[in-house]
Image: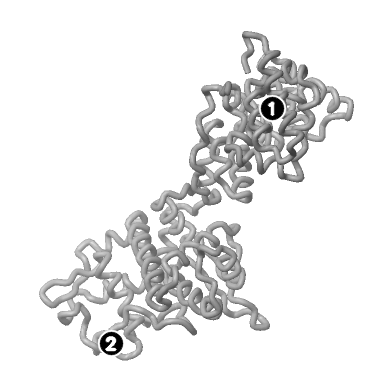
Amino acid sequence: MDTPSHHPPPPDPPRVSARPVRLHPRTQLAFAASHCPLYANALALARWTGPTVPVTARGFPDTPLIREAVRTLSLRPANPPADGPAEPGGDPACDPPAPAFALPWWEAVRLGMVELAAGQARPAPDLEERARDPRQILLWWSDMFETTVEGARGDLTTTEPGTTGPDLLPLVLRCLYEAPDRSRVPLTDLIAALLADPGAVPVTARIRRRLPGLLLHMLGQLAETGAVHLDHRRPGNGPCLVRLTPLGRYGVRQILLSVGVPAPLVDDIGKVEAGAFLDSLRSFSPDGRIIAIDSWLAARTPARALREICEAVDRPGAELRRWDGATVLELTSSHLGPQLRALLTCDRPPLTHLAAIVLLGSRMLRQDEIDRIMAGRGPWVIVDMLAAALSAGEDGLADFLASPATGGLESLILDDVDRLRRTEHPDTVRVLEALGRVHPDPERAARSRTAAFLVRALRRPDHPG
């Protein structure tokens, strides 16, 4: 088989990128972090220990001091769970207010806000200075948030032995992250999304019955960190609404990046060079793809976008880039009419046909112009389209042929082999041979194999197939 050397085997599919987001400024995030219940209570307890407070061998103050702290600092969980497992971290030696004390106390100790030594607890020497530094506040908060997420995952596993609990909360957070900014997602929608993924949780009657309470418990823990907001007060007993806060978006993005999921920022997308940008588009969800394209175009003029995309797609093996580039340019084609028409007459086939693709999809052309472009450029465009599908492997080409929107286009290039030869697309033979292997219609598959043989035979020596 005569296969161009510039086509390596298709790579493993990339991890689906999170949708691009815009984060609040650091100082604003730090302000929000410093006022979330868990962080504020931990810092208040650290200050309360000054100058020193005696602690037991377990690292807790005595019960009367705990009661004093709870009363003086008005320590209460912001979102006590109505159902679900008991709150973790309580001290069994204390009265019911202890859980409101225990969790922020251990966070203060763990984060270094409080020092324990020789039976005494005291504030860290540089506590006040560090508590005014936005960078330090976000470091403390991020640690607190990630610990809470891990604790909630472990808590679910303990409560529901045998479930895939550790995978449940990340799926919930990803759903909330992908939701539009400031949107409130009904708890019922989150549950439906989880149950729709058979790998998320085992879909048993018990899990279906317990899932609303389990999710509310986990989300209530995250609400203590300020990462989510829960609205239980729905008229007519409507479902609880869940919203990822700007601070939560920051925290979830940190987790996504830590596990290798691309999580771009809107402001960074505009700085990406065209080739890398076009290569990344296939990794986004449909909604994320729209945001990415809008963000990239917003950072440059239409003429600059056209120039950069032309530079990125004018090379061998750039079929996917050309089609994604055409998709991007179609959104701004109304500003590029003269430039695109000028490209139709240039001496670079990839650019000529990129312009043809954009113009054909722009609705700017009269029918006679469409007919003229299709007569002159149509076969090259169709081969390029099939090569783009084939770049994802023969399964990708098979999916393309099975699609109601695109299936049947290949018939436009199988009726005139001489015209196919004259298109001079470098992937013509490769595409025809692949059609011969995967086309579901035996007659068209045979015609494709015959066309591949004839095109190779008719190609001039300086234009090998």
Q: Is residue 341 visible?
A: yes
CB atoms at circles 1 and 2 under 8 Å apart? Answer: no
Up-down: is 417 above or below 359?
A: above
Tell me if 36 is positioned left or right of 374 in this view: left
Residue 28 located left or right of residue 348: left
Q: Position of residue 305 (x, y in %)?
A: 62, 30
The residue nearer to you, when weighing 215 against 28, is 215
Mark 2, secondary structure of its residue: loop
> Given the image, on which type of amino acid does mark 1 rest?
Arg
Q: Dot 1: few (<14), some (14–19), or many (≥20) neighbours within 10 Å?
A: some
Q: In whole angstroms, how far apart are the C-alphas of marks 1 and 2? A: 77 Å
Residue at image coords 37%, 62%: 146
In the rendered image, the quadrant that contains the N terminus is top right
Vertical arrangement, residue 405 with respect to residue 54, above or below: above
Which residue is denoted by mark 2 in the rendering?
92
Q: Nearer the viewer, residue 382 or 48?
A: 382
Observer-nearest residue: 263 or 428? 428
Quadrant housing the C terminus = top right
Q: Name the residue carrying label 1.
A: 449
Would residue 133 be found to the left or right of residue 446 on screen? left
Percent coordinates x, y for residue 19 in the rendering: 55, 50
Return the x and y of residue 159 as percentages of the image width and height. Answer: 40, 78
Residue name at image x 19 percent, y 72 percent: 122
Foreground label between 1 and 2? 1
Q: Residue at x 65, y 23 (%)?
A: 429
Secondary structure type for disc 1: helix
**Among the 4 quarters of the image, the one containing residue 234:** bottom right
> Looking at the rendered structure, which numbered label has been put on residue 46?
none
* Residue depicted at x 33% and y 76%: 103
Asked where in the image residue 28 lies, by quadrant, the reply is: bottom left
